[in-house]
Image (cartoon, coloured by chain):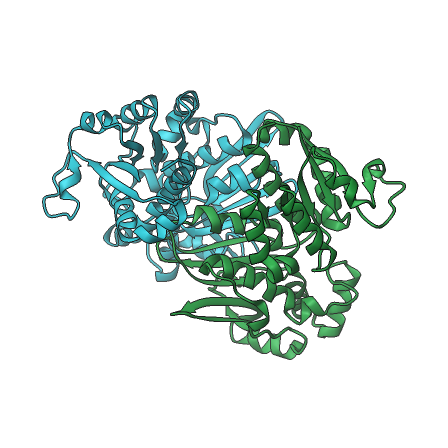
Chain colours: A green, B cyan
Amino acid sequence: MMNLAIFGFGTVGSGVWEIITNNPEHLKNKTAQSLNVKYILDIREFPDHPAASIITKKADDIFNDTDVNIIVETIGGTGIAYELSKRALLSKRHVVTSNKELVAAHGPELFDIANRNKVCYLYEACVGGGIPIIKSMKESLEANKIESIEGILNGTTNYILGQMFSNKISFADALKAAQKNGYAEANPAADIEGYDSVRKLAILSSLAFNKFIDYRKIPTEGIQNITLDNLEKAFESGAKIKLIATSKMQGDKLIASVRPTLINESHPLYNVEDVNNAIVLNCNNVGQVMFYGPGAGKLPTASAVVGDIVDIAKTMIA
Amino acid sequence: MMNLAIFGFGTVGSGVWEIITNNPEHLKNKTAQSLNVKYILDIREFPDHPAASIITKKADDIFNDTDVNIIVETIGGTGIAYELSKRALLSKRHVVTSNKELVAAHGPELFDIANRNKVCYLYEACVGGGIPIIKSMKESLEANKIESIEGILNGTTNYILGQMFSNKISFADALKAAQKNGYAEANPAADIEGYDSVRKLAILSSLAFNKFIDYRKIPTEGIQNITLDNLEKAFESGAKIKLIATSKMQGDKLIASVRPTLINESHPLYNVEDVNNAIVLNCNNVGQVMFYGPGAGKLPTASAVVGDIVDIAKTMIA
């Protein structure tokens, strides 16, 4: 039996609990052992939740329990999540995360601590929600040099642009609709100003080009100044405006940006609608491949986290 | 150092040799050891090829060399390829294959021999050329039950249908163009009658639904009776005709087929053109994900083979 602790019981964390709790036989077939969520760490109270008995505010209790092999970090941000991830890796626990802010800001340090302690720090859920892009880049495409990356990495902005055009509404009204439908936060800056996209682009680029790319150095422009008129003019010319993240190496220099971009109808990203994400990789041997799917949401993102957990569990003795 | 032998020096086999020979440093970084093609087995002569000195007709020489750990089978078909694959697995060599006919026909037996001999039998290159679909299904999406599969699995037929429509030509003329451009065989039956697609569908379905699906039991219809008029009528109604392979389980029963199908412009497969392939998976947690890329060709397919080789090499002691 493999014991886990989930740190942070928000949308993604509770999705991870749900998938593990609802699919015990399916997961046991994959890993040859049972997965057991032994603790959930959160500062909030969840008295009526079926998992209430395992929810705790005391991280020490979890770290002192040597039966816990895997920590799932779905707290988000770079504060307490950073401290707890470091502590988990230093105590030789595998860590699986959906925290793109943390990986974008402190990835190299955390990967290094993981390596030195011979444990994994896996982050499939950080980019593209449920799309298996990280593992495909890390493992399946290793016969290739990745030459460039182009993607729609933020579902909220893609949804807003789609709503503006199809319902003929302003940016402000589409943002309100996105907030009403739970696709945008009350403070939507990270999404609409492109900061979420650029963190994900930096994570993909670091992996593709095998060096740390600091997201703060990538020129970033959001969709807040896009008007319905812009979208309609684009459409008349056979194109859509999408928030596109791109990067490539030119010699030793990284050329990267996040900005609203005209996409023609023959382009593989043209048909990416709603909150979906897609990533196009141009590779030296395979050519152009694209990965497409839901870029956010409770179960898609949690599914990527559980995929990483299963990967670890498969290689560990029960 | 990891020594390999390539069985069959046709398009894919020579592509594998080329990638390994041209990217030694890149691959060494991935596997922490050198990959060395020690033998190439083929009944033909290649006197002017740079690899001429390692090409042999004698399989025994290769099997007797205990330094050879990995056999790459790119012979194709179910005759000698079957015998040699079995022999390789029984002699505890890992086998990496691009031979979809063999995996579709004898997969369960060969997987079983591989398991019993504690070696791998990997087949990423059998479906979708360079698209990392098999590994994604096997490993990344394991938190999911795959509910249905829908795909364009044959590049030749997709190219022919595209050529017919865009150049306003008949099926016969488009087939001739495909043959002229090297996209269709002199005997194109396996492609245009849907047999190539149905083998790949059976391989994907066997993996998704965790039971052997016999491709011979799947209703299969090719594109040979599609007319330009059909395509134009479809277009007037906002759709394209594509050769679509689909499968899903309904209780214990598999519902599967390969047949020309109307695809609306909002469908993720609508924009798949030329010799590209794409596979849509509908999954219980992640929802709909799509994988897209070149479905055939020397380097894309060889890239998938080398990806499997790297996977094996990474876990073997040098």
Image coordinates of residue A116 in percent, x first then y, are 54, 47
Q: Residue at x 55, y 63 (%)?
A: A202
Of B220 and A4, nearer the camera is: A4
Extreme residue in the left direction: B47
Q: Is residue B145 above or below residue A168?
A: above
The answer to whether residue A161 shows anywhere in this view is yes
* Location of residue A258 (image quadrant): bottom right
Q: Is residue A61 above or below residue B80?
A: below
Which quadrant would the C terminus of chain A be assigned to in this image? top right
Image coordinates of residue B236 in percent, x first then y, are 50, 59
The answer to whether residue B226 shows anywhere in this view is no
Of B241 and A99, nearer the camera is: A99
* Location of residue B83 (image quadrant): top left
Of B172 and A10, nearer the camera is: A10
Image coordinates of residue A4 in percent, x first then y, are 69, 37
Image coordinates of residue B89 in percent, x first then y, are 34, 25
Q: Residue at x 42, y 45 (%)?
A: B128
Which quadrant would the N terminus of chain A be assigned to in this image? top right
The mark tally for this picture is: 0
Q: Is residue A70 above or below residue B238?
A: above
